[in-house]
Amino acid sequence: MSRNTRNLIGRVLFYLLVGVILIYTIFPFYWAFISSITPNNQLFATPVQYWPQNATRQNYGLVMSNNNFLIALMNSAIVSVSVTALALIIGSLAAYALGRFKFGGRRVVLYTVLAMTMFPQIAVLGSLYTMISAFRLYNTLWALIITYMIFTLPFTVWVLTNFFKAMPRELEEAAYVDGATPFQTFYKILLPLAAPGMVTTGLLAFIAAWNEYLFALSFTQTPEKRTVTIAITAFEGATASSFEQPWGQIMAASVLVTIPLIILTLIFQKRIIAGLTAGAVKG
Amino acid sequence: MSQRVATTSAAPSTGKRTLTLAQSQSRFAWILLIPTIGVVLMVGLFPLAQTFYFSLTDARLASSREVNFVGLQNYLYLLQDQQFFRTVGNTVFFTVVTVGFEFALGLLIALVINSNFRGRGLMRTSILIPWAIPTVVSAQMWKWMYHDIYGVINDLLVNQFGIFNQNVAFLATNTTVSLFAIAAVDIWKTTPFVALLLLAGLQVIPGDVYEAADVDGANKIQQFFAITLPLLMPAILVTLIFRTLDSLRVFDVFYVMLGNRRDTQTMAIYAQQSLVNFSDLGYGSTISIAIFLIIALFVVIYVTFLKIEDA
């Protein structure tokens, strides 16, 4: 009996803990959403409303008709897709070499790649700025696409190398016996097998590029070249009072920027977790 | 690959062919690596060397003025720069607080998810939400929650739970309060990542170890300290080093929430401000190199710890 009660108390406490963790992780996002559908007169009022009396879509309407924000969304999409594609194309070649071939210097390259995955961007900020100015790329999306390779490519190479290394050797050998060249073996046999790894690393590269802030802040200037991370910090709503930032619109924009990422994350949950733990890379 | 080389070289007559095969494979591998090496040199190693060069000069950003070599002058200045040491202090404080809390909370969440219960999948999914939100966006969300008049955190603390009797201006003047407030945002955002890394470590511990411990009559707490913690150590170390590296270069969350405030500046913000806002390419590069060296030290520890196996 006493053992049963102890078990019951243990279970209750355990689920209480689960509940607390769930509320802790979800509440800020919930709050952003609630704020985004609350009319301004209730948003900037005390006491704080935990549920709006009359929900409004006004903030979303304002955000979606804000040209600067839409351009920024477009810019972020262009930059993130380009960076992901480049990192995957260049990175898969290197990963194939590092994962399937033995050659002198392989270790040095691997160590360099691993060290580069933790490269502090701030260490090259000034130098990249002068390079970008010299090539007349300041305030262009090219500046971002090129410089974002510093944090996407090494990570892509590192994780894909592990994928290539884990593949069975027999298929490759059969291809060689049939007279396939190493390059044919790569794109006809190994690359299709590496598709799950490519999806994982591609997603992580996309998310990293989408979330980048420091380079976007330093290498772009005008609203038509901004990415979403800059746009969301530079929000000047049409109806903002002179005293207060348009928090309702900022929260609506935050929800809009985040929802695609949350959907991607939920769909590819298992892959992302596998990629994160394989690469042990920052989120 | 090693198997193939071994079998072919077993026959002495093909020894010469094996050598040329190995050579051509090596050449092919290096050709595949050319694009990656090119990119890494262009956006990583060359700029790093150039930053080091700039740190020895009085160069200005986007200026046609003549550049003078000033030797170690910038470094000598750095050693007496109170603001630099303040930013180091802020960054280290932030790192210790966030990594400490993230580890403790992350381990708790990992242990919870690792035990079998209904709703486990939902929980694993929901903790990915903070991870998926861009840092800049989460900073904006929390900035609104921290609002000194209309913020939900003040409402919870003052009106709902009555912990304080008046509203707190979290992001206003008090340095320590602001630093803790920012740390809370990072802890919320990054704990899931820590939990996932630790969970991966927990899942490779074989279950029969615990069964044996059960047979021997060890209770759960004894099992945690005698089995779980020692076997989890590799995952813990990787996670801690990784998070430390990440925290030391923190920029986004501070910049979005506190802007250019001097008293709460981090190392990365100080460097970025010197470089871009004050166009001081020489001294800004010196700060960058100092940050690089501090982080490089941790990277070396990390890489040697990880010991890449050469399969």
Image (cartoon, rainbow, N blue to C red):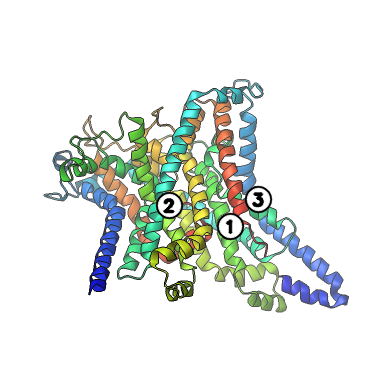
Chain bearing mark 1: A
Amino acid type, callout 3: Ile
Residue assigned mark 3: B37
Question: Residue at the location (15% across, 51% down)?
Answer: A51
> Mark 1: which secondary structure?
helix
Q: Position of residue B151 (x, y in %)?
A: 22, 40
Q: A16 or B189, which lies in front?
A: A16
Residue A217 point in image, percent of width and height: 44, 37
User: As shown in the figure, which amino acid type bears the numbered disc 2?
Assistant: Phe
Q: Residue A14 occupies which quadrant of the picture?
A: bottom left
Label number found at residue B266: none
Find disc 2 in the rendering and name its residue: B103
Would you place residue A150 above or below residue B192 in this image?
Answer: above
**Residue occupying the point 51% across, 26% down:** B279
Chain label for disc 2: B
Q: How far apart are marks 2 and 1 (CA)?
A: 25 Å
